[in-house]
Amino acid sequence: MKIKAVIWQEDDVWCASVPALPGCHTWAENREQLTEMLQDAIQGWLEVASEREVLEPEKQLVEISV
């Protein structure tokens, strides 16, 4: 699976965000560490999402009774 990440540097900190995964962000002191942290952040996000069934859009529907 390919997931795009936005990577930037602020002062001495490397930052990353994954637009397709809301709330999936991380940072590190160098680019090599950032790559590892980003892989962990994505894996963690996907694990939590699958536990909560976020990845199945048909189960996100809210039923409204009238």
Image (tube, rainbow, N blue to C red):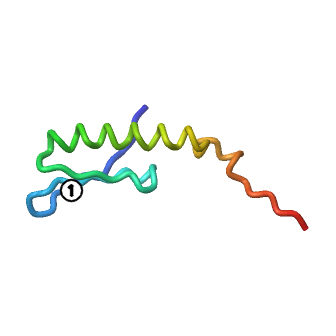
Label 1 CA crowd tier, 10 Å (few <14, some 14–19, many 20+): few
Q: Is residue 3 above or below residue 22?
A: above
What is the three-letter code of the residue carrying label 1? Trp
Residue 61, given in percent of the width and then of the height, sits at 72, 54
Say which residue label 1 marks.
8
Q: Quadrant of residue 22?
A: bottom left
Q: Is residue 55 above or below residue 7?
A: above
Residue at the (26%, 42%) spot, across then down = 37
Q: State the residue lying farthest toward the bottom.
A: 66
Residue at the (11%, 47%) spot, across then down = 30
Q: How many marks?
A: 1
Residue 13, given in percent of the width and then of the height, sits at 14, 57
User: The N terminus lies in which quarter of the figure?
Assistant: top left
Residue 59, given in percent of the width and then of the height, sits at 70, 46
Residue at the (28%, 51%) spot, across then down = 26
Using residue 23 as the reference point, say whether residue 51 is left or right of it: right
Q: State the residue lying farthest toward the top.
A: 1
User: The C terminus lies in which quarter of the figure?
Assistant: bottom right
Using residue 5 as the reference point, say whether residue 62 is left or right of it: right
Q: Quadrant of residue 2?
A: top left
As helix, strand or loop, the secondary structure at mark 1 comes to strand
Q: State the residue lying farthest toward the right.
A: 66
Using residue 8 as the reference point, say whether residue 3 is left or right of it: right
In depth, the one of 38 and 3 nearer the eye is: 38
Using residue 50 as the reference point, say whether residue 44 is left or right of it: left
